[in-house]
Image (spheres, helix red, strand yellow):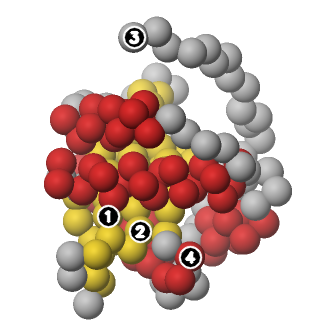
Amino acid sequence: MLTIRRATPADAEGIAAFNEAMARETEAKTLDPATIRAGVRTLLSRPDLGFYLVAGEGDSLVGQLMVTFEWSDWRSGLFWWIQSVYIRPEERRKGIYRRLHVHVREMAQKEGGVCGLRLYVEKENAIAHETYRRMGMRETDYRLFEETWERTR
């Protein structure tokens, strides 16, 4: 039976492995294992930054998503950003992402002070676009720009 729950530190290795698989699959990127594990552990220990939800069957993780927060002064509320979505390939098309998304939506509505959900998706990922549309999300007029740099330790 599938369960959805907040991740705990015991899930860190599985989450990191999912993030590595997602980067390879969606962007053909290889993540630095030490960096991704440090990033996962940090989020798990800092609820002010966000949280992970995991979907599992027994002791086995089959999917995940991460939520981070963005303050909107226009709305005087928080957007919850859905990120790091990953479902094991053999478990896809079984409604697991739908269950994770509905769970996040219900959490946000119950929390109060949350004004909406947002996410970004690869431009060419048509399957994901359709999935998010079916969940009631719509494409916005915004484009994403970023400036990145390597962190020094």
Kindly state the secondary structure of the residue where label 4 is placed.
Answer: helix
Kindly report the distance in space between the C-alpha atoms of the residues bearing marks 4 and 3.
Answer: 34 Å
First in sequence: mark 1 or mark 2? 1
Helix, strand or loop under label 2: strand
Q: CA distance from mark 1 to mark 3?
A: 29 Å
Q: Position of residue 27 (x, y in %)?
A: 71, 48
Is mark 1 in CB contact (under 8 Å) with mark 3?
A: no
Amino acid type of the residue tagged 4 in the rendering: Pro
- Picture disc at residue 153: 3
Residue at 33%, 32% in the rendered image: 38
> Which residue shows up at 23% across the image and 65% down it?
5
Earlier sequence position, callout 1 versus callout 4: 1
Q: Which residue is denoted by mark 2 in the rendering?
A: 63
Q: Position of residue 7 (x, y in %)?
A: 23, 56
Q: Nearer the viewer, mark 4 or mark 2?
A: 4
Q: Left or right: where does residue 10 sit relative to residue 31?
A: left
Of callouts 1 and 3, the N-terminal one: 1
Residues under labels 3 and 2: Cα distance? 30 Å
Q: CA distance from mark 1 to mark 4?
A: 15 Å
For label 2, count other residues whose C-alpha is less than 10 Å away and answer few (under 14), some (14-19) or many (20+).
many
Which amino acid, mark 1? Answer: Val
Q: Which residue, given by chain and number where applicable, does mark 4 sit on?
A: 89
| Discs 1/4, front | 4
Q: Position of residue 83 (x, y in %)?
A: 50, 48
